[in-house]
Image: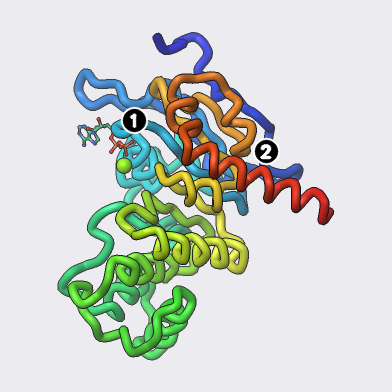
Amino acid sequence: MADTKNRQPQRLNKRPEEDVGPPVVEIRKLWTRFGRTVVHQDLNLDIYAGEILTIVGGSGTGKTVLLRQMLGLERPSEGCVKVFGQDITAADAQQLQRMRNHWGMLFQQGALYSALTVFDNIAFPMRELRSLPEDVIRDAVLLKMDMVGLGPEHANKMPSDLSGGMIKRVALARALALEPQLLFLDEPTAGLDPDLSDSFVALIQTLHSELKLTVVMVTHDLDTLFALSSRIAVLAEKHVLAVGPACDVLRVQHPFIKHFFLGPRGQRALEVLEERQAQNDSED
Ligand SMILES: Nc1ncnc2c1ncn2[C@@H]1O[C@H](COP(=O)(O)OP(=O)(O)O)[C@@H](O)[C@H]1O
Ligand SMILES: [Mg+2]
């Protein structure tokens, strides 16, 4: 049974680094109920500037709902979600609109507007949330396309003309349209074959370090998870069961963690991670 007395996540280290400042996202005592179903029960989580925080959990544990609550698209039944210090559960439509300027989101499904060209998909948030002249938008869209490795020749294509990997790139360019400080990714590599998935991971890595983004990601893909995460938050028993760097989370004794990470693929990914860390340590 879930431990209902202590719902604080098991914190495996205090912060990704010292002196990183206040959390960019601060979730306190969050409850989510749909009718009689309790999805989140007294959930707490902090996300710090510059990190890639990955949320993992079984299917239906409320990962997507939690992301949507951080975006202000859904309100929790109880509790507080602060983004950049502002309580988004109490924000009115106008405040939310203003806050949307500071983050980008790559949704799991329905990534693009099927009736709009690549160009218009990426321009959409700029036209909706900012009043910019068309020539500025044009330059910005082409710049974003370049950032995600899409040449200008793709600008007038329709989503139906694109491969799965290109759709993800366009969706990422659109998520970056407003130059966000905070990027949400829900299953960014789901449905991509391993090669495409690797190149998408490399792209996220580059953008993360170049743009100094804070990234909140949901993924069940272990390669993506190990390649990108600064810290991992495990969602189980309706709350954040443990949060910390991968090597520490993996040591937590819990059936979900064992099942999720410690199969053959998890072991392999962990070995790669440990090798990489040993390499980094010897370089320092
Ligand atoms: N609007 C809704 N109304 C009722 N139940 C919902 C709603 N949105 C999500 N749920 C339920 O909440 C649970 C968590 O959903 P979700 O966050 O999508 O899970 P996942 O962790 O797989 O992303 C699921 O059981 C889902 O059926
Ligand atoms: Mg989901």
Give the mark, 1 or 2, whose residue is nearer the N terminus: 2
Question: Is the CB atom of the residue marked by disc 1 within 8 angstroms of ligand 1's nearest atom?
Answer: yes
Check disc 1 and give the amino acid type: Thr
Res 123 → quadrant: bottom left
Position above or below: 86 against 212:
above
**In the rendered image, is residue 127 in sight?**
no
Residue that carries the numbered disc 2 in the rendered image: 15
**In the rendered image, is residue 136 in sight?**
yes
Check disc 2 and give the amino acid type: Arg
Crowd around label 2: few <14 · some 14–19 · many ≥20 (10 Å): some
In the displayed image of the protein, which residue is found farthest to the left?
Answer: 115
Residue 187 point in image, percent of width and height:
37, 50
Quadrant of the rendered image holding ligand 1: top left
Q: Residue at x 23, y 27 (%)?
A: 34
| Residue 61, disc | 1
| Residue 190, disc | none
Q: Residue at x 50, y 56 (%)?
A: 182
Please, what secondary structure does the residue beneath circle 1 have? loop
Res 151 → quadrant: bottom left
Q: Residue at x 56, y 37 (%)?
A: 46
Residue 158 point in image, percent of width and height:
20, 78
Q: CA distance from mark 1 to mark 2?
A: 24 Å
Q: Residue at x 47, y 56 (%)?
A: 183
Crowd around label 1: few <14 · some 14–19 · many ≥20 (10 Å): some
Please, what secondary structure does the residue beneath circle 2 have? loop
Q: Is residue 17 left or right of residue 31?
A: right
